[in-house]
Image (cartoon, rainbow, N blue to C red):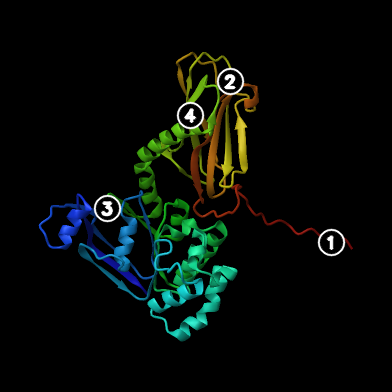
Amino acid sequence: MGALSVAGLGKCFRVYRSALHRLGAWLGLPVRHEDRWVLRDISFSVQPGESVGLVGRNGAGKSTLLKLITGVMAPSCGQVQVSGRVSALLELGMGFHPEFTGRQNVLMQAYLQGMSHEEVAGLMASIAEFAELGDYFDMPVRVYSSGMQVRLAFSVATAVRPDVLIVDEALAVGDAYFQHKCFDRIRRFKEAGTTLLFVSHDPGTVKSLCERAILIEGGRIMRDGVPADVLDLYNAIIVPEVASQAIGDLARAEGGGLRFGDGRLHIREACWRVHGQETVALTAGQPAELHLLVEARESMVDFTIGLLVKDRLGNDIFGTNTFHLAQEPGPLAAGQCQAYVFRFPVLNLGPSHYSLTLALHASSNHLAGNYDWWERAITFQVVPEEGNRSIGVCHMPVQLERTATPERAG
């Protein structure tokens, strides 16, 4: 079984003012440069059969850490010790030759993994079957889509169960069908004792696959512990980033047709809160609150606040508004900002990714007078309730009761 140990690991890149300065350094000239540390003092261990998720914001150093562990990069300091057969799926298409066919790239990758010609020949059919590329398997990789490259790369990397499996976020590019196949194989590897190191921004996937999570922030380990606790901290540190992203989206939306209305009322802020904390990861079956801040740019006696939840394909999942709820949000004076809260005692959405559309309008729908319609005001994820697994876009608590068997007539 595979184990992993990282001690005092660090990676520093030299930053030169220009290409000429870099050339001078290569020639041995005393050229000034800046040392930029991407990772510092990274130490942790992964026990055989353990599953660990790496989380962190973009640029935190997660991918660099994986490259150091797999030997793609050399560390500036520290040590990495890995035991057992290691298989890694890092950057999309890494190691593939674009002019070679899928079959030829499989041969090349398998040989690099230390397989013999006989082993590769015995596995080729199963690799092609799992990848499901059809005739493209014998076409050059340069004609592959990103999703097809993921299929080929994952199929090769997992053709033989490794002792240690390291997966970066490349799987996020694949289609949902193939993602399900990949995660099913990963789970079976886990059950057989494979050690897993997994990078993802998906809280549901981390909670589902991993018993432990490590949060990396600014090139250092901020938290190492139970996934739920680590992800709570992760959600807390990304709030400023989420807020700035929302501001950018708003500016683009107002100029790009994704947000429209006459502007007499305006949604200034919108967010989900759980136990008073702002979040974009909700739990199925648990309470949640939708907080809105509405600004009146002119006096309004009566208006309607509406919300619509859509799945990742844009299908309507749930919608309602204050008109149908028989609740009056007005009146508002010109210049007034008013906060509102939609409380959901039980969030009955199934685990998945969703978006929320918000609207301010007159009467029962926006056709009677639209003040502010905001498509994809919030994108969020619903993760499974602990100990209660379900599939689908709705989460309905169900109980089985054993009753008396009815007697048959005759």
Q: Residue at x 60, y 51 (%)?
A: 392
Give the secondary structure at mark 1. Answer: loop
Q: What is the residue that sits farthest to the right in this orientation?
A: 410
Q: Amino acid at mark 4?
A: Leu
In this orientation, which residue lies closer to the viewer: 111 or 55? 111
- Residue 113 visible at all: no
Query: How many circles with numbers are drawn on the protein?
Result: 4
Which amino acid, by three-letter code, is at mark 2? Phe
Measure the alpha-carbon separation of dots 3 and 4.
35 Å
Q: Which label's residue is closer to the chain start, 3 or 2? A: 3
Position of 221 compared to 180: left or right?
A: left
Q: Secondary structure at mark 3?
A: loop
For marks 3 and 2, give the CA distance.
49 Å
Camera-nearest label, 1 or 4? 4
N-terminal of the pair, mark 4 or mark 2, is 4
Specify the amino acid type for callout 3.
Answer: Gly
The 10 Å Cα crowd at callout 2, few under 14, some 14 to 19, many 20 or more, is many
Q: Is residue 186 found left or right of 72 in the rendered image?
A: right
The picture places residue 178, in percent across and down from the top left corner, at: 55, 62
Q: Earlier in the sequence, mark 3 or mark 1?
A: 3
The CA distance from mark 1 to mark 2 is 60 Å
Tag 4 residue: 292
Which one is earlier in the sequence, the residue at label 1 or at label 2?
2
Residue pointed to by mark 2: 303
Residue 252 image position (x, y, % from top left): 46, 34
User: Helix, strand, or loop for circle 2?
Assistant: loop
Mark 3 lies on residue: 219
Residue 293 horizontal side relative to residue 39, left or right: right
| Residue marked by disc 1 | 408
